[in-house]
Amino acid sequence: MQGLRGLTWLLVIQSAGELLARALHLPFPGPVVGMVLLLGALRWPLVREPVAECAGFLLNHLSLLFIPVGVGVMTHLDVLSHYGGRIAVVLVLSTWIGMAVSALTLHALSRGDTFAAEAPPEAPHG
Amino acid sequence: MAEVVALWVYLSATPLFGLTATLSVYVLAHALYLRSGQAAWANPVLWSVVTLASLLLATGTSYPGYFSGAQFIHFLLGPAVVALGWPLWQRRTEVRQRWGRLLLAALLGGGAASGSALALSWALDLPHEVLLSMAPKSVTAPVAMGIAEKIGGVPALSAVFAMLTGLIGALSARFVFRVLRLPYSQTGWAARGFALGTASHGIGAARALQVNPDAGAYAGLALGLQVVLAALLLPLFFR
């Protein structure tokens, strides 16, 4: 029941996000506005407890949710096979560049930071 | 035989097929992923997509036919994006303290990903609409489609590029981070997760969530920031 209540809250907040995005002509998609609204709503235990349970379930299976769009690759096999090699080069290199720049920026800026409880080093499997 | 074909034609035309096929294939792919010790190459999105697309092509089932069932799973992306607020809220004091540098890392990382994709597409002489569809590729697929439409790209192509970018990030992150020599401390995991969310959106975040909870939370934050920054800045840039 708690999980169902959590899903209901998430959908209510997403709807509020959609309405807000439309009414104020925000350039952001509704769910993103909803994510910001949720951050405010989580201070209330009435929202927090059920949402915690449902969010845990949804986020554990986040990969599943990308499959329907992913299968859409099959509708563009012609473009992909025609420019495949070049597209692969662009996608791989730009992903690595973006990943390296953001990781190094954050890491360099965080050098002086100490967390309240620094976790013990974990087995390397990133 | 004719009866089997008739039965298939009937089943593949109902939403039941797309939904059942997606869930069954994912459950299997996920079991194999766990069996492999959560190896990056066993990524469940990659193998599910490959299996389902091959299945549809081999049986001559149309993508819209499949999607009529799979849309029920696709729909959950909305509440899942809202739910990304939860791991973030759990780390709110820490995020509040580091706000400025997180924003800077998101801006530089997202800019580098988009900028290098555009520059490389131009240098390799890819068609203009393919180039424009590359710009929002580090943003989660449903948002990338919306941005592509605004800047003159092909939305469906952007969704494909976003999906591939997510997979490339999830598959190769470990290798990239090893080259960068990031430490295995909490700040190190935060930087890894943040980079995965910035460059590879939800698929990267899903990988980060599976590997380390701190990395997962920062990946969720980075993916949210990327959506906001890209939705705001890319249309301005291409005007």
Image (spheres, rainbow, N blue to C red):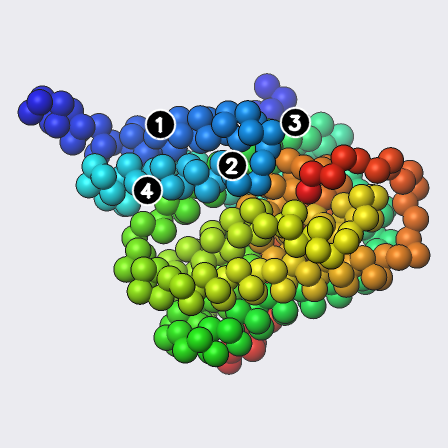
CA gap, disc 2 and disc 4: 17 Å
The chain carrying label 4 is B
Going from N to C along the chain, the mark reached first, 1 or 2, is: 1
Going from N to C along the chain, the mark reached first, 4 or 1, is: 1
Q: Disc 3 designates what residue?
A: A53
Q: Disc 2 designates what residue?
A: B42
Give the camera-side residue of B73 and A119. Answer: A119
CA gap, disc 1 and disc 2: 21 Å
3 or 2: mark nearer the eye:
2
Disc 4 packing (10 Å; few <14; some 14–19; many ≥20):
many
Amino acid at the residue labelled 1: Thr
The chain carrying label 1 is B
Q: Which mark is residue B53?
A: 4
Is residue A82 visible in this depiction of the protein?
yes
Residue visible at 49% across and 66% down?
Answer: A90
Residue visible at 76% across and 61% down?
Answer: A104
